[in-house]
Each structure stands twice: as C-alpha cells, then as structure tokens.
Amino acid sequence: MARTLRETIPFRLTYQHQSFGRCSRERMSVFLIALFACLLFHQDLAYLLDRTCEGHVELGPKITAGIDARYYDTAWMASLYDGKREFVGGGSLISKRFVLTAAHSGAKNPQFVRLGEKDRSCQISICTAVKEYTVQRFIRHPRFDEHSSKMLNDIALIRLTDSVEYTDNIRPICIIVDDSVHFPEDMFVRAYGWGLTTTTTTELSDVIKTIRLRQTRPSECYDSLHVNLTDSQFCAGAFLGGDTCNGDSGGPLAADFEYQGKTSYVQIGIVSYGSTKCNTKGVYTRVENYQKWIVDTVQMYEERLVYPDCGSEWHGDIAVRLWEMTLLQRTIIGTLISDRFVLTVASDLPTDVTKITVRSRYHTDEIRVLKIDKHPKFSPSSKSKENNIALLELAQPVLIQDLVKPICLTVNSTPLKTLTALLYADNRRILGLQRQQLARIDNSVCSTKTGLPVEPNQLCVEKPSGYRYDLPGSVLGTYKEVNGVKRYLLVGIISHIKNGVIVFTNVQSFEDFIKEKVVGESMAVTSTYNQWTSPKLTYRNPPGSKNNI
C-alpha cells in the first residue's frame, strides 16, 4: 500500500434505504430479523455492532504517503487467502464471526482469513499472534452487479467457520449502527493494506502499509476517472501524493469518531477501485449506507436457536429428556424441536400419516401427526442409509411445560468439539440420566468397522457399554454456550448400529432441510465468483488478477 493502496476501481452500490418500519415479512424467521431491525433503528437502540471494539491507538508517526503500519494498532485487519494460500486482498474484522470486505474480492475465491497479521512473510509458526480461520460463506450484497458500469454495491461479508477469540492483537473495528449518524463529507481517513507500493513492480508489500486520505467532491473522481458516483460511494485522495493500489481491495478506511461520549476507531469505507496507475483519486464504498444490510446479514447468519424456549434440565442441573417422544409402539424415538415439529429417522416410518402418533415420555396423551416429511434424498435401499432424517408435523401445538420442552437446536452452528449422550444405565441401581462423553470415530475407520459406506453427513461413535442406547432416533448432543447460557444442543440421531458402532445422522448437515420446513426459511446462499473487464479502471486486486472493470 505505500504510495498506492487500493486495487483498480472496484465499485459499490446505491442502496436505497427503505423505511425500517416495514417489519412484516411473509416468513417467521425473516419477520424476527425485520423486527430486530425495526427496534434497532426506531427505538433509539443505536449502538456499535460489536461493543468490544476499541479506540484507535497510533504508535507510529503521522504520515502523508504510504508507510509501514506495523506500529499502528491494526488488530481488526484481515488478510484473505485462496485455497493455495496466495494473498488475494484485505478486509476488516467486525464481530466474532464476520469480516467485512469488497464484493469483487469474491472473484479470487478466498478460502482462509488471517487475523493479527502485519508481516505476511512471517510464518504462523513463528508469528504466533496470527490466527488463521476458514471461510464458511462469502456473502455478497444482493444488488452487487459485476456487469454494471457504475460498479455499485461493492461490499460483502465473510462468515468464518469458527468464532474468533479476541486477544490484544485481534479485535473488531467499530461499525456504528445508527441511521442518524452521518460522517463529514470532507473528513480525513486512513486506508490499510498489503497492496503494491509502486506500479513499477508486481510485488505486493509483505508488511502492512497505511496512507492518509481525504474525502473529496465526487466531481474530482469524475475529472480523474470519468465515473459518476452514487451516494453510496465516495471519492478520496492524498494531497501530498500516494494512493491505494492493486492488492488493497476490500481493506478498510477508518477514522477516529466520537460516538456516545467515546472516541472509537470507526470504519468509514472499503477499498473498491481506482486508476490503473494508482496515482490519483480512488472510489470507495461508503459503509454507513449499508448499516441495515450488515445488521440483517449478521443476524441472519449468526448462530441462533430454532426454538428459544428449549431445554434439557429440570429444576436446576438435573438432566431430563424433556424433548423425547416415542412412536410406533416405542420402537423409534422422536425429538421435539419446536411446539409443532418432531425430528426422527426416515427409515421404518409408514407412508400413511394416519398410522402414526407420538407420545411424550412424561405424558400419556397421544398426539396425531398431520404430515410426514422424509428427506427427499433418503432411499430405503441405500446401504449407508444416507439422509436418514424426517420431520413430523403435529396436528396441534404441544403445550410447553415443566416436563415437555423442545431440545435446543441451533442453525448456523459452529463445528463440534465434544459429544455427549444423556443415557440411562443398564444397572437400575444407578438412578437418573448419566452424562456420557463420547469420542467420534473417523468416518473411514467407521466404514471399515461396520462394513458399510459412511457418508459425510453421518458421524460414528463406539456404542457405550452398560447403557441403553440403541433405538433409532435416539439423541446425541453437545454442551455449549449459546447467548450466554450453557445448553444441551442436538447434534445427531441414531440411524443404525452395526458391529458395536453407532452411526448417526448428523443433524447439523441438514440445516436447510429443517429451516425450510420448520421456519420456512431456506439457507441456500449463492456465492458466485465473478470476473470483470474494463479498458480503463481496475479493482484493487493483486497483480495477476483480472482487475479491469
């Protein structure tokens, strides 16, 4: 980034703010998110997206052109890498699971994000403060159009597979969520990145660089770049020379800003595009115009409970299978996941819905089933019993009470770390449920032991001795903190058992199926990586990329 910091002209969009009062949505899950946004923007609940973000601490001298930024506090800076771990651009950490970047950065298919990195030449084994995370989803703004000459909506969010652990070297940048806040049109900002420091070379900077820029009139970008900007973009340049350049795409532009009586280091823009010569004004995405989209997207993809009034404890820490339902004369176990749906295995279920009822473990009343939804890709003849999962829609809601409660089930889950089953011992002198921690068997080992194929959406454990744990549909779970409360979460249900090994249907692999049926929300997210062509302007991608717009 030294004297040239962005890529060549990336774009962003003119996002027309609709009334945040429109809080009715067709589907419940979307409605809840809309309601959150309405409360957020219309009941004075203005706030920082992640309140743990901190003010800026500059440990180095002020600069007027691109210089070494190692001694600046850049704990929020993210570096993006493709599957070969080649650097593809920058971004900024905005919460424990999300990185903000440019939409056009998706063209390089980023697969990994490094946080706490200042010198890219330093190996992670040596620079132990650097942490690498896997990209789970690349979420471009829905109105980003790579074919538009206006290059609008150049903004995207990266959802990480694991939650980030904040340290002295890794913290989020501040994102103000308050539609009454507008930044000055002529404010000074700082841009950060590892882009080219001169156009006479194709070598990116190993060390993070920074440059001080000032927002200018849109007409100045028209004069130098011949582009008309929208109100969701801004023009900026360095008066004493310097620019963002190739390799800086997606990086943040930030400034100190006093908000709610505190000075915070706030992200103002995102490096989008500019001149191929990297020596004039550049175009940047205006982050404040995307507050609502950022909040909605983070809320949509954050880990959350399918049914909040869930639980597996009774009067304190006593584990009870409050969610357990029996069906087909107690030959199959079902699991209540909401007041209207029971999750179970697809195998052995009848096709005639009138032949099946469910009964709570602690109540004698039978509940009629309205509809049976087997997974569309389940095949009874499959040796592996792949996709062995089904949902039973009940004819009437279950009364949620002390001894009847859905199991906790999350969507947008993080990877498993432990597995726990709540089991009754064969020895009847041992009273109550016992928490048994189980070790997962590698799927290839499981296949060898069972003599059956094991699919990616299945998982295996050794059958614990001395416990009753064999009915299809029986639950495997994990203890985890969700929204500040430790909960027992559903992980899998028994599909079949062979040679002392239990094969489970991994429920986390069927988020889309469950959400579509239970809350009417499909999780499918299209991450299409695009290329751009243009004779004059380029995104700030690294050299060798297809930068032209």
Image (cartoon, grey):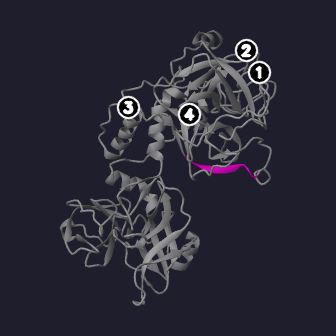
Give the residue at mark 3: 42
For image coordinates 76% across by 15% down, the residue present is 240
Circle 1 residue = 64
| 1 or 4: mark nearer the eye | 1
Q: Which of marks 1 and 4 is nearer the N terminus?
A: 1
Frontmost of labels 3 and 2 is: 3
- What number is the disc on residue 419? none
Magenta segment: does it hold 130? yes
Residue type marked 3 = His
Question: What distance separates the C-alpha of mark 1 from that of mark 4?
Answer: 28 Å
Residue 487 appears anywhere in the view: yes
Give the quarter of the image for residue 233.
Answer: top right
Identify residue for label 4: 103
Q: Where is residue 498 in the image (x, y as percent from the top left)?
A: 47, 80
Residue identified by numbered label 2? 239
Is residue 144 in view?
no
Residue 263 place in picture, x, y as percent: 61, 31
Q: In which quarter of the image is residue 21?
A: top left
Q: Decide if residue 217 is on the left or right side of residue 479.
A: right
Q: State the residue at coordinates (65%, 48%).
A: 83
Mark 2 or 1, nearer chain start: 1
| Residue 42 in the image, given as x and y percentages of width and height | 38, 31
**Residues at discs 2 and 1 in contact (Cβ within 8 Å):** yes
